[in-house]
Image (cartoon, grey):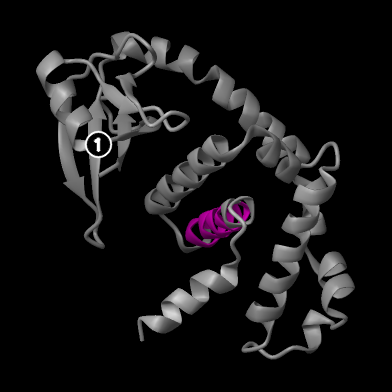
């Protein structure tokens, strides 16, 4: 079973994250180098192609009982990790630069799709109406693929990229330390989950029906 791997420096600062399974965890301990799951192929490969040495590798549990793995690396390999992350940083910069255009996922599109002013809705009505509007906008992005849209960027990169972003956003939510951070990261995660659902021909309603069935 795959789990999140957090890679930290000796001061406890998060450097990056990856995905590891039980075989990869054992192989990492045996070799002293990190082996992680390549999300695009599902194969177990040396992290960063050649593997990254670590000081400690352990299994941890969050306060809500979720297991994850944590590796601590020395200062000698931090520069190497920094280089490996440059591409991801460039993509994050692209994301931030296009985020403003994605703010059409707000009242403007909400009104177009629902015909209702969200300010006139009750607290009980708002979630369903807004999720319906958001899902429609994400669907339209996939059909129309407008240039300069971050959602278009995700769909163009394909399923492996979308799944990777969902994993990254889940990690950021787990690490959120303030109520505001929890809200911000939860919003990012929900959005990326909805993109993943759309890419698989599924809807948020399918998820809600599954939850309903667990009552």
Relative image position of residue 160 (x, y in whole percent) = 52, 36
Callout 1 crowding tier (Cα within 10 Å): few <14, some 14–19, many ≥20: some
Which quarter of the figure has residue 153? top right
Q: Is the residue 204 above or below the residue 199 in the image? A: below
Q: Residue at image x 18%, y 22%?
A: 28
Left or right: 200, with 95 as reference point: left
Considering every residue shown, the one lying at the far front of the view is 201
The magenta-colored residue range is 181-195
Find numbered disc 1 in the image and state the secondary structure of the residue it sits on: loop
User: Residue 103 magenta-drawn?
Assistant: no
Which quarter of the figure has residue 88? top right
Q: Residue at image x 49%, y 78%?
A: 209
Specify the quadrant that holds the C terminus.
bottom left
Specify the quadrant that holds the N terminus.
top left
Relative image position of residue 6 (x, y in whole percent) = 32, 35
Relative image position of residue 83 (x, y in whole percent) = 48, 12
User: Residue 183 magenta-drawn?
Assistant: yes
Which of these two is toward me, 136 or 167?
136
Which of these two is toward me, 78 or 27?
27
Q: Residue at image x 26%, y 62%?
A: 64
Left or right: 209, with 175 as reference point: right
Q: Residue at image x 43%, y 28%?
A: 41
Left or right: 124, with 49 as reference point: right
| Residue that carries the numbered disc 1 in the rendered image | 21
Q: Is the residue 208 above or below the residue 9 in the image? A: below
Left or right: 106, with 170 as reference point: right
């Amino acid at each position: 079973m795959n789990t999140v791997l957090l890679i930290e420096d000796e001061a406890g600062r998060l450097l990056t994250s990856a995905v590891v399974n039980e075989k990869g965890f054992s192989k990492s301990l045996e070799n002293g180098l990190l082996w992680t799951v390549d999300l695009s192929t599902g194969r177990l490969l040396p992290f960063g192609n050649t593997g990254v040495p670590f000081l400690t590798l352990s299994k941890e549990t969050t306060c809500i009982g979720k297991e994850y793995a944590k590796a601590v690396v020395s200062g000698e390999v931090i520069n190497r990790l920094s280089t490996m992350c440059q591409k991801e940083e460039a993509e994050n910069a692209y994301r931030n630069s296009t985020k403003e255009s994605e703010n059409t996922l707000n009242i403007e599109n909400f009104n177009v799709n629902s015909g209702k002013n969200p300010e006139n809705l009750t607290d009980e009505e708002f979630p369903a109406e807004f999720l319906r509007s958001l899902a429609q906008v994400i669907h339209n992005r996939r059909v129309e693929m407008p240039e300069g849209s971050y959602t278009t960027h995700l769909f163009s990169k394909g399923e492996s990229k979308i799944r990777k972003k969902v994993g990254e956003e889940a990690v950021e939510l787990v690490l959120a330390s303030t109520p505001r951070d929890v809200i911000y990261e939860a919003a990012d995660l929900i959005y990326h989950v909805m993109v993943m659902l759309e890419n698989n021909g599924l809807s948020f309603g399918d998820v809600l029906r599954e939850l309903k069935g667990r009552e």
